[in-house]
Image (spheres, rainbow, N blue to C red):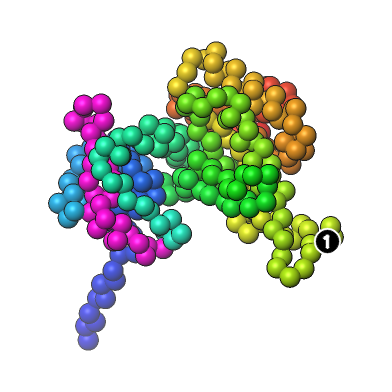
C-alpha cells in the first residue's frame, strides 16, 4: 500500500512579503538598506528583482536621491498600504501614505539616518549570534502625556528590542533619538525631560484618586514595556568637536535638572556617534554615559 506524501505550505515569508513589511515599518527605505536587511550575502540583483516585481504590481514606488539613479528610496503606494493593513507583524503601525517622490525625498535624510543605526545593530547581532531581526526596530513611536507640563506626547525616533545570547540570555529595549544637528543642543537635551516625565507619569484612574501606595501599579509606561527602555542618543551631521559638545550638553542636562537626575539613577542613558556605530559596531566602547564617569563603553554596559 502506498501513501501519498502530504505537501505542506511553507511557513516562511517570501522576500516580497518581507520587503513590503519593512517598507511599511520604516515608511521608506533605500535599495542598499533593503539588501543589507534581507539578503546581505546574495548579489544585489536579487533585491532588484523583488523590487521590480513589487513596482510592476503597483504596490511600491520610488524616488531618486541626489540625481543618482542608483540611489533609490522605496515607499508604499495606496495599494501597497491596503495590502499590508492587516498583517500581524505591522499591527498598530497604520502606515500613512507618502504623497509623492518629492515628499519622500524631503523626509529621507532623517529616516535613512535612523535606518543606518538600525543596520549597525543588525550587523553586530549577526556577528555575535544575538537575536535581533529587521522588524525589531520600530520608528516613530508615540506615547501620550496629557498632564506633563504642556508636553502632550513623547515621540521617540525609534524603539528597538534586542536579545543577547552570550554570556547569558538577556532582553534589552531602548528608545533611540537620532540627532542630525538640525535642532539646537538645548532642544535636544530637553528630550531628556520629556522621557523623565513619561517615566513618572501616572494616569489618573477614572472615578477615584490614586494613592501613593498603589501609584506604581498605574505607571503609564508599564502598559507597554516590562522594564523602562534605556535611552540612546545617536549623533551625526557635524564635526567631531561639535558632536562631543552636544554630548557634553546632554550630560549637563542630566546633572542639572532634578527630575532628569533622579530619572538617570533608574534608566541607563548614553550617546554615541553614528559613524562610530558603523565603523566599530554598537557593542564596542563608543558610548558615553550621560551620568557618572565618561569612560566609553558598549551600549549594554551603560
129 w.r.t. 120: above or below: below
Q: Which residues are magenta?
A: 59-88
Inspect the magenta stretch and tell me whether residue 175 lies in it.
no
What residue would you read off at disc 1? 211
Image side of residue 208 versus residue 130, left or right: right
Quarter of image, res 176 = top right
- Of all residues, the one furthest to the bottom in this rendering is 1
Neighbourhood count class around disc 1 (C-alpha, 10 Å): few under 14, some 14–19, many 20 upward:
few
Image side of residue 131 versus residue 199, left or right: left
239 w.r.t. 76: above or below: above
Residue 97's spot in the image, x, y percent? 32, 51
Residue 131's spot in the image, x, y percent? 50, 47
- Of all residues, the one furthest to the left in this rendering is 56
Q: Is residue 265 visible?
A: no
Please name whichever residue, 29 or 14, is drawn nearer the observer in this view of the structure. Answer: 29
Question: Looking at the image, which residue is at 50% across and 40% down?
Answer: 157
Amino acid at each position: 500500500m502506498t501513501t501519498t506524501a502530504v505537501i505542506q505550505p511553507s511557513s516562511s515569508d517570501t522576500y516580497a512579503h518581507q520587503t513590503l513589511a519593512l517598507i511599511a515599518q520604516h515608511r521608506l527605505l533605500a535599495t542598499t538598506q533593503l539588501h543589507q536587511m534581507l539578503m546581505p550575502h546574495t548579489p544585489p540583483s536579487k533585491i532588484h528583482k523583488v523590487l521590480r516585481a513589487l513596482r510592476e504590481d503597483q504596490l511600491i514606488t520610488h524616488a531618486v536621491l541626489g540625481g543618482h539613479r542608483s540611489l533609490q528610496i522605496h515607499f508604499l503606494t495606496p495599494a501597497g498600504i491596503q495590502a499590508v493593513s492587516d498583517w500581524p507583524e505591522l499591527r498598530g503601525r497604520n502606515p500613512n501614505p507618502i504623497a509623492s517622490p518629492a515628499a519622500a525625498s524631503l523626509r529621507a535624510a532623517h529616516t535613512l539616518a535612523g535606518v543606518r543605526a538600525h543596520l549597525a545593530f543588525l550587523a553586530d547581532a549577526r556577528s555575535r549570534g544575538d537575536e535581533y531581526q529587521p522588524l525589531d526596530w520600530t520608528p516613530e513611536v508615540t506615547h501620550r502625556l496629557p498632564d506633563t507640563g504642556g508636553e502632550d506626547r513623547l515621540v521617540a525616533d525609534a524603539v528597538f528590542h534586542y536579545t543577547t545570547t552570550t554570556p547569558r540570555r538577556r532582553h534589552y529595549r531602548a528608545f533611540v533619538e537620532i540627532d542630525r544637528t538640525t535642532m539646537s543642543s538645548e532642544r535636544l537635551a530637553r528630550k531628556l525631560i520629556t522621557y523623565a516625565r513619561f517615566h513618572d507619569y501616572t494616569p489618573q484612574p477614572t472615578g477615584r484618586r490614586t494613592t501613593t501606595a498603589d501609584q506604581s501599579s498605574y505607571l503609564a509606561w508599564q502598559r507597554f514595556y516590562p522594564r523602562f527602555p534605556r535611552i540612546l542618543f545617536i549623533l551625526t551631521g557635524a564635526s567631531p568637536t561639535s558632536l562631543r559638545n552636544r554630548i557634553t550638553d546632554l550630560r549637563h542636562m542630566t546633572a542639572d535638572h532634578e527630575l532628569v537626575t533622579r530619572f538617570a539613577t533608574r534608566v541607563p542613558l548614553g550617546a554615541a556617534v553614528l559613524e562610530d556605530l558603523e565603523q566599530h559596531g554598537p557593542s564596542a566602547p563608543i558610548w558615553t554615559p550621560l551620568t557618572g564617569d565618561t569612560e566609553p563603553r558598549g551600549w549594554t554596559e551603560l
